[in-house]
């Protein structure tokens, strides 16, 4: 399964199967929240939240790809991410794009990134 943020895959033709998405709402445990609160006082990167969002993007991407695979897709084009706060100290990450099926017989391998 390939994913790309571009709308086209040069050198390949494909059929559009439909929109796919994956979402997750994630938070950090209370210890990380406490340390993040202290970090806001002195400034700088809040590594716990950076890690949380990285993990959430990976989960959302995996879920999007699983949905695409269920549709018989070879890949997802036009991938985008959206993030929003759902409740205090929890964020939703949404990954979405268009599932596609490659039409070229020689293109069973994912296109080079």
Image (tube, grey):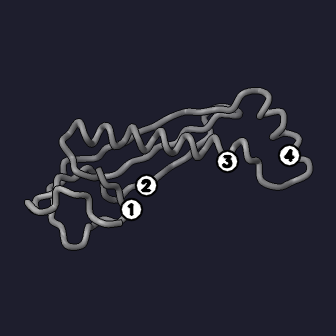
Asked if residue 38 is positioned above or below residue 79 in the image, the reply reads: above
Indicate which disc, 4 or 3, sits on the residue closer to the N terminus: 4
Mark 4 = which residue?
A: 39
- Counting residues from the start of the chain, the first of labels 3 and 2 encountered is 3
Q: Residue 80's mark?
A: 2
Q: Residue at x 83, y 33 (%)?
A: 34
> Does dot 3 land on a helix, a strand or a loop?
helix
Ranked by sequence position, the earlier of labels 1 and 3 is 1
Q: CA distance from mark 4 to mark 1?
A: 33 Å
Q: Secondary structure at mark 2?
A: strand
Q: Are marks 3 and 2 in contact (CB under 8 Å)?
A: no
Residue 39: give x, y in percent of width and height.
Answer: 86, 46
| Mark 3 closeness class: few <14, some 14–19, many ≥20 residues within 10 Å | few
Query: Between disc 2 and disc 4, whose residue precedes?
Result: 4
For residue 99, side relative to residue 57 (left or right): left
- Residue 85 location in percent, x, y? 62, 39
Q: Label 2 neighbourhood size at 10 Å, few (<14), some (14-19), many (20+)? A: some
The mark found on residue 5 in the picture is: 1
Label 3 and label 2: CA atoms lie apart by: 18 Å
**Mark 4 → mark 3, Cα distance in angstroms:** 13 Å
Gap in angstroms between the C-alphas marked 2 and 4? 30 Å
Residue at the spot of label 3: 50
Disc 2 vs disc 1: Cβ atoms closer than 8 Å?
Answer: yes
């Amino acid at each position: 399964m390939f994913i790309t943020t571009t709308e086209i895959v040069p050198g390949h033709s494909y059929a559009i199967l439909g929109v796919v998405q994956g979402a997750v709402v994630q938070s950090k445990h209370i210890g990380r929240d406490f340390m993040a609160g202290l970090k806001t006082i002195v400034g700088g990167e809040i590594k716990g939240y950076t890690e949380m969002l990285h993990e959430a993007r990976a989960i959302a991407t995996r879920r999007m790809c699983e949905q695409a695979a269920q549709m018989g897709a070879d890949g997802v084009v036009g991938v985008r991410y959206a993030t929003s706060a759902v409740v205090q100290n929890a964020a939703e990450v949404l990954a979405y794009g268009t599932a596609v099926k490659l039409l070229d017989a020689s293109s069973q391998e994912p296109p080079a990134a």
